[in-house]
Amino acid sequence: EDEDEDEAEDEDEDEDDDEFREEMRRKVENGFLPSMDTHMILWKYGIVKFPDDVEQPNHLAVIDLRYNLIREFPSEMRYLRCLLHLDLTTNRIESIPDSISHLKRLRGLFLSNNVIREVPAGLCRLCRLQILRLDHNNLVQLP
């Protein structure tokens, strides 16, 4: 009996987690940026689109959106002047905009497991970049 109760509780928790993830995914896609001060970490939320209002002044240093469904590299990222770490591993990103060169403080860029074909020349202007992960993409050209 205790085992059945534990399983029922686990199922309830899983349903609550799924509902929370779905609600958060909808909010993010509609422009809501979670108030996380310097870190935004949203793994496996099924996010398809990065919020449009990211250009509002903020102090995000870390954005980790691994394992989502994002297709376009958010051009709004250029406004994130404090960004140090960007992880968009295992999404569906097809290209990186040249505006990535605006992320002057970026030290880690993780774009593995996407469908990126080309890397823009602007990436070479990121002087502080220490880690670049582009494995498991469809790269045909490097700058």
Image (tube, helix red, strand yellow):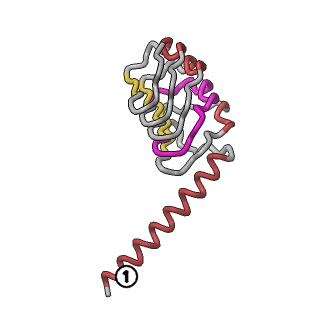
The answer to whether residue 130 is left or right of residue 66 is: left
Q: Position of residue 120 (x, y in %)?
A: 54, 17
For the residue pair 44 and 1, the one nearer the viewer reads as 44
Query: Is residue 34 magenta-colored?
Result: no
The correct choice, above or below, for 82 with respect to 72 in the image is: above
Q: Nearer the viewer, residue 59 or 94?
A: 94
The residue lying at 58 percent from left, 31 percent from top is 73
Relative to 72, is 127 above or below? Answer: above
Label 1 sits on a secondary structure element that is helix
Foreground: 90 or 8? 90
Report which quarter residue 69 is drawn in.
Answer: top right
| 110 displayed left or right of 77 | left
Q: Magenta region's main secondary structure?
A: loop
Q: Nearer the viewer, residue 5 or 89?
A: 89
For badge 1, the amino acid type reads Glu
Let me know if residue 68 is in the magenta part: yes
Query: Farthest bottom residue?
Result: 1
> In which image quadrant can residue 5 be found?
bottom left
- Residue that mark 1 sits on: 5
Residue 52's x, y, as percent? 68, 37
Question: In the rendered image, which quarter is residue 22 located in?
Answer: bottom right
Magenta-tinted stretch: 65-85
